[in-house]
Image (spheres, rainbow, N blue to C red):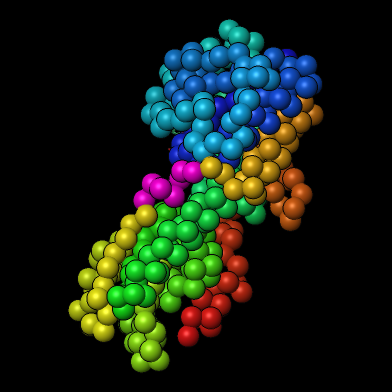
């Protein structure tokens, strides 16, 4: 293994830059030639692959987003696109690839690594925390902190006006952000893709709060829950429960941005360091993850296929108990 490239793909996540820095510097420390691929798989196809030295990643540890940019690249799903990507890597004699991204990125990496002679290691970089084999994915902690800060502000106005707020947070198929932020912000209720909460139950809960003089109520709505978006739910609830003035906030893309938390800077550094060490040790088709505060390798296949979502049972119970 002589030359290693790193790319970020899919949705960006805070901490990706910390990880890129760790990948580049760990590789250089071990005498490898390091490359950065711009715009994810698109850059592989376009041959937008640039040599990186230790100074090229100076002063990025604290920055959100990704200096390598990211993209959603449809051409990489086609055989012709993959072929071209491999040719460009071959030309530069790049034999190791670190991909930082979510499940789509890993699906592409798995196909690519199976078909071509290149060693691939994945780093779980997504705010959704929806990959197996890592207790936390990169960017998840920062996203949680960002959401909590936003909810705290909404709580101020909700409380002053006796309002009921429905706040929609990200998580197409994972309620991780919703559950944690519900506990941390003292939300009255949370709607998750993984748990059935009927609108009737929700209204009963809100009524109970109103009858015991709660001056505001906050319901966290995870994108992927079965009753639809926060606007739809607010409308349905409003028809049967009129005690509060009802408002909706969709937090949207602000959840992806911002300077990474201390946790994500450390996680990004650990995972980047581990990814290069795994490549040097001859590993391929694995994801590096944090499991019980130790680095663990999981096959890309298992990272994608074992959906043991990480909704802690005590947190789930607590959302009922602590919001009375
Ligand atoms: P994320 O990695 O955050 O889940 P996406 O689902 O957009 O984001 O995936 C990122 C990129 O991975 C896609 O734009 C595409 O280039 C690549 N990709 C996704 N699925 C496949 C696939 N089945 N085959 C090849 N490449 C894929």
Indicate left or right for 92 with 246 as reference: right
Q: Which residues are magenta?
A: 252-258
Image quadrant in which you'd find residue 197: bottom left
Inspect this view and state whether residue 179 appears: no
Residue 14 pos. (x, y %): 53, 42
Placement of the N terminus among the 4 image quadrants: top right
Q: Quadrant of residue 135?
A: bottom right
Q: Is residue 33 left or right of residue 258?
A: right
**Position of residue 45 measured from the top left corner of the image (x, y, whole percent):** 46, 17
x, y (%) of residue 18? 62, 35
Q: Is residue 256 magenta?
A: yes
Q: Tell me where residue 312 sits by quadrant.
A: bottom right
Q: In the shown orientation, is residue 2 left or right of residue 175?
A: right
- Residue at image position (52%, 60%) is 176
Which residue sits at x=53%, y=15%?
49
Q: Residue furthest bottom?
A: 211
> Residue at (53%, 64%) from the top-left corner?
180
Residue 101: say if magenta: no
């Amino acid at each position: 293994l002589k030359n290693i490239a790193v790319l970020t793909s899919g949705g960006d996540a805070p901490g990706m830059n910390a990880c890129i820095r760790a990948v580049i510097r760990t590789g250089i420390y071990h005498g490898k030639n390091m490359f950065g691929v711009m715009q994810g798989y698109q850059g592989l196809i376009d041959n937008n692959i640039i040599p990186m030295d230790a100074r090229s990643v100076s002063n990025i540890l604290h920055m959100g987003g990704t200096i390598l940019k990211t993209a959603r690249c449809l051409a990489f799903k086609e055989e012709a696109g993959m072929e071209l990507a491999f040719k460009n890597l071959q030309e530069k004699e790049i034999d190791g690839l670190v991909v930082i991204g979510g499940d789509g990125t890993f699906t592409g990496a798995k196909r690519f690594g199976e078909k071509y002679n290149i060693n691939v290691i994945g780093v779980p970089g997504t705010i959704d925390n929806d990959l197996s084999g890592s207790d936390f994915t990169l960017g998840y902690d920062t996203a949680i902190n960002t959401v909590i800060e936003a909810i705290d502000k909404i709580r101020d106005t909700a409380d002053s006006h006796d309002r009921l707020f429905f706040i929609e947070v990200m998580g197409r198929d994972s309620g991780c952000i919703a559950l944690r932020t519900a506990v941390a912000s003292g939300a009255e209720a949370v709607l998750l893709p993984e748990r059935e909460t009927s609108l009737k139950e929700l209204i009963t809960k809100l009524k109970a709060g109103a009858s015991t003089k709660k001056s505001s109520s906050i319901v966290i709505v995870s994108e992927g829950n079965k009753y639809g978006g926060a606007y739809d739910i607010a409308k349905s609830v409003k028809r049967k429960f009129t005690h509060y003035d009802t408002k909706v906030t969709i937090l949207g893309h602000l959840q992806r941005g911002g300077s990474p938390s201390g946790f994500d800077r450390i996680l990004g550094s650990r995972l980047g360091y581990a990814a290069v060490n795994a490549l040097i040790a001859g590993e391929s088709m694995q994801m590096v993850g944090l499991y019980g505060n130790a680095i663990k390798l999981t096959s890309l296949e298992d990272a994608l296929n074992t959906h043991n979502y990480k909704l802690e049972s005590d947190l789930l119970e607590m959302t009922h108990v602590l919001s009375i």
